[in-house]
Image (tube, grey):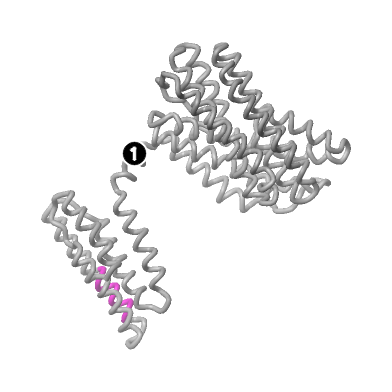
């Protein structure tokens, strides 16, 4: 009864909102759920064929009812018809042993889907053809190519596992893809924090570049530009932690204090910088983050860093690992983070992996500081230095104390 009433309440509200004559509302959906439960109960006595016949008969009844309603109103409410059949099936689940929990969970999900019609329609309509194609590309690399790859190392050092490398491509691409879709749907005008966080998911370097160009044209947005840039840069650290958490939980706990400290210091200083006047006048333009060729390039770069780190460890010891981290951090922190987290599970000491990841994050932050000075103005670079340098100092100090 409660399941039917839950779905029926949403349907009744929809009927009133659309100001149309509905076939089924609160009372009808409650009765539908009871009818499903009774059918399941009777099928225990008359056999499974009774349940099949009851469901088929009810589906026919619903089809006739909504067809008549469509003829009268000139519109087909197919969603309501499907909801009615689903409610009948949920009632049948309640009549089965251990089926109530599943029925309740499904009822909540179904009601949520029905209640968010306007929101989901608005979001879907905001998607472009490029977004749909990116979704298909994401599905191809994750669900088509990945299962076909071999799951054994192909190199003499035992580190180049095609499936593992491709999983890293999927992971990093997915993070950027989600950030890009959220920006496309929500836009960046809803708040500076949202701009920084979502921009940082795609590329904190892109946010830094965009804000540097903005302050060069309009100095009045200085405080807002610094805030967005720092928030985007701080988003990089939770992103790194997420990657490590997926691959190596033990390493995650050792990186958590230093990266969390850098995030906290950065956010506090970003809030202080926002106390000035000014606002961002335009959205950050983020290009399509998912294309097949860049994804393959990242996979090759990750494999190179993985192999180079292993070879450097064998022939040059810890110094070689740190050198590889320093070079990799100039362009991207994800690849070296993935490499270190992977190697730390087998052949690399965790303390070395922690220092290497921290070194890459420091290098990448310094690169963004250089961009702020070169592409922005002196004031923007100075204020970014006042934020980045304390942030880096705290992160390095915590890392040295713990490792």
The C terminus - image quarter: top right
The N terminus - image quarter: bottom left
Residue drawn at (74%, 53%) of the image:
152
Q: Does the magenta stretch include residue 56?
A: yes
Residue stretch in magenta: 50-59
Percent across and percent down for residue 131 are 44, 37
Front residue (pair 193, 343): 193
Front residue (pair 151, 15): 15
Front residue (pair 309, 9): 9
Left or right: where 11 falls relative to 265: left
Q: What element carries label 1?
A: helix
Q: Residue furthest bottom?
A: 45
Q: Is residue 325 magenta?
A: no
Q: In the rendered image, which residue does mark 1 sit on? A: 125
Residue drawn at (50%, 23%) of the image:
273
Q: In which quarter of the image is residue 32?
A: bottom left
Percent across and percent down for residue 323 are 79, 31
Label 1: few (<14), some or many (≥20) within 10 Å? few
Percent across and percent down for residue 293 are 60, 34
Left or right: where 270 falls relative to 117: right
Left or right: where 71 falls relative to 391: left
Residue drawn at (30%, 76%) of the image:
37
Front residue (pair 105, 261): 261
Q: Which residue lies furthest to the left in this view?
A: 72
Percent across and percent down for residue 299 are 66, 39
Left or right: where 107 falls relative to 145: left
């Amino acid at each position: 009864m409660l399941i039917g009433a839950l779905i029926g309440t949403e349907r009744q509200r929809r009927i009133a909102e659309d100001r149309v004559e509905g076939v089924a509302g609160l009372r009808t959906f409650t009765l539908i759920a009871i009818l499903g439960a009774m059918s399941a109960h009777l099928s225990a006595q008359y056999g499974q064929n009774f349940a099949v016949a009851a469901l088929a008969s009810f589906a026919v009844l619903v089809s006739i009812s909504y067809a008549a309603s469509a003829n009268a109103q000139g519109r087909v409410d197919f969603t309501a018809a499907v909801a009615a059949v689903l409610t009948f099936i949920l009632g049948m689940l309640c009549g089965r042993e251990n089926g109530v929990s599943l029925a309740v969970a499904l009822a909540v999900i179904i009601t949520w889907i029905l209640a968010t019609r306007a929101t989901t329609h608005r979001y879907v309509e905001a998607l472009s053809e490029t977004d749909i194609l990116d979704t298909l590309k994401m599905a191809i690399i994750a669900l088509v190519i990945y299962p076909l790859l071999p799951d054994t190392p192909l190199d003499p050092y035992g580190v180049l596992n095609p499936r593992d490398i491709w999983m890293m491509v999927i992971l990093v691409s997915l993070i950027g893809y989600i950030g890009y879709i959220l920006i496309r749907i929500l836009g960046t005008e809803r708040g500076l924090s949202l701009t920084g966080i979502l921009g940082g998911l795609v590329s904190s370097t892109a946010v830094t570049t965009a804000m540097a160009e903005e302050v060069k044209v309009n100095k009045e947005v200085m405080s807002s530009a610094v805030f967005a840039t720092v928030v985007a840069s701080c988003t990089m650290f939770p992103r790194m932690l997420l990657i490590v958490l997926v691959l190596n939980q033990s390493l995650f706990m050792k990186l958590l204090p230093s990266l969390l400290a850098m995030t906290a210091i950065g956010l506090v200083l970003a809030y202080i910088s926002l106390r000035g006047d000014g606002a961002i006048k335009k959205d950050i333009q983020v290009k399509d983050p998912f294309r097949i060729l860049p994804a393959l390039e990242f996979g090759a770069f990750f494999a190179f860093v993985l192999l180079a780190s292993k070879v450097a460890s064998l022939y040059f010891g810890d110094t070689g690992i740190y050198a590889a981290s320093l070079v990799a951090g100039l362009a991207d922190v994800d690849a070296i983070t993935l490499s270190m987290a992977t190697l730390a599970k087998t052949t690399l000491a965790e303390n070395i992996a922690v220092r290497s990841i921290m070194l890459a994050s420091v290098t990448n932050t310094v690169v963004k500081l250089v961009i702020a000075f070169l592409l922005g103005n002196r004031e923007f670079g100075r204020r970014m230095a006042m934020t980045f340098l304390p942030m880096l100092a705290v992160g390095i100090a915590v890392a040295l104390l713990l490792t």
